[in-house]
Amino acid sequence: MTKNKNIVIAIDGPAGSGKSSVAREVAKRMGLQYIDSGALYRAITLYVLEKSGESFTPEDVCRYLNTIHLEQVFNADGSCTTICNGIDVSEKIRSETIASHIGKISDIVEVRHFVNARMREWARDHSIIVDGRDIGTVVFPDAIIKIYLDASVDERAKRRALEYSLKGKDVDRDELKTQIRLRDEQDMKREFGALKKSDDAIYLDTSNITQNEVVQSIYSLINTKIQYC
Ligand code: CDP
């Protein structure tokens, strides 16, 4: 991307802040590889649930890590395919069951090391834009640009409700707000890899701006930065 080396763009923020849509769009425009770190945690969660059911222990999870191989493919249409041991799990990992168990799995430090190592491997070969919770703080502290995307709980619940309704599901907005607050608390309080704005990250509140405006701001920031590299 720059003359001599690959670059990393880190996008962190809470659930529903628009990270993945924005990161995918910027990746498409700039020819970057998009990495969805949440999907990697989701894929591990699916694997564990399929092996052990809901009664897994942290020891089971650590043992399974030796038998999991993860790949991600960023497609020309902007979608991201997550592959676990050769199987495309992109659809399956989006279930409510995965969402309700992922916290227990992504809290395990060995799981975090496993996912982080895989993403760092990819960063050696490509210029990447990665979204997650701890990308700018833990995984890629030297990322060339760090963005922290945020939005009010009301706005995030509205976006999630819209996503569900597009899938034909009707959900209670207050229930969604409760889930979002709970997930924020869990993500912010975890011992390893907590959701946190890095001191050198640019904070963008997306509550009252369109996705296009967010994409354009990030695009301009990257271009300005790259000129000086
Ligand atoms: O799309 P949404 O933000 O709801 O979820 P996601 O990005 O797919 O991430 C799902 C869950 O994975 C989060 O709530 C976190 O608990 C966990 N996660 C994490 O621990 N670290 C990351 N870098 C990304 C996700």
Image (cartoon, rainbow, N blue to C red):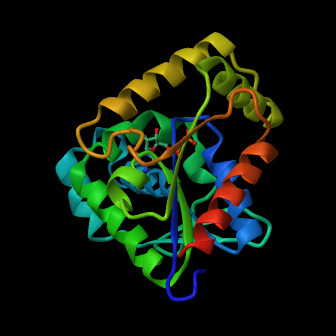
At 65% across and 17% down in the image, what residue appears?
154
Residue furthest to the left: 59
Give the percent coordinates (x, y) of residue 141.
36, 59
Residue furthest to the top: 174
State left or right for residue 198 relative to residue 63: right
Q: Is residue 229 above or below residue 185?
A: below
Q: Quadrant of residue 219?
A: bottom right
Q: Quadrant of residue 165?
A: top right
Q: Is residue 12 above or below residue 222?
A: above
Residue furthest to the front: 228
Q: In this view of the protein, which residue sits in the foreground, 143 or 86? A: 143
Count every numbered label the image shows and give the total: 0
Give the percent coordinates (x, y) of residue 228.
56, 72
At 39% across and 77% down in the image, what residue appears?
121
Give the percent coordinates (x, y) of residue 7.
52, 73
Give the percent coordinates (x, y) of residue 24.
69, 59
At 59% across and 14% down in the image, what residue appears?
175
Q: Quadrant of residue 177?
A: top right
Q: Is residue 183 above or below residue 135?
A: above
Q: Quadrant of the N terminus?
A: bottom right
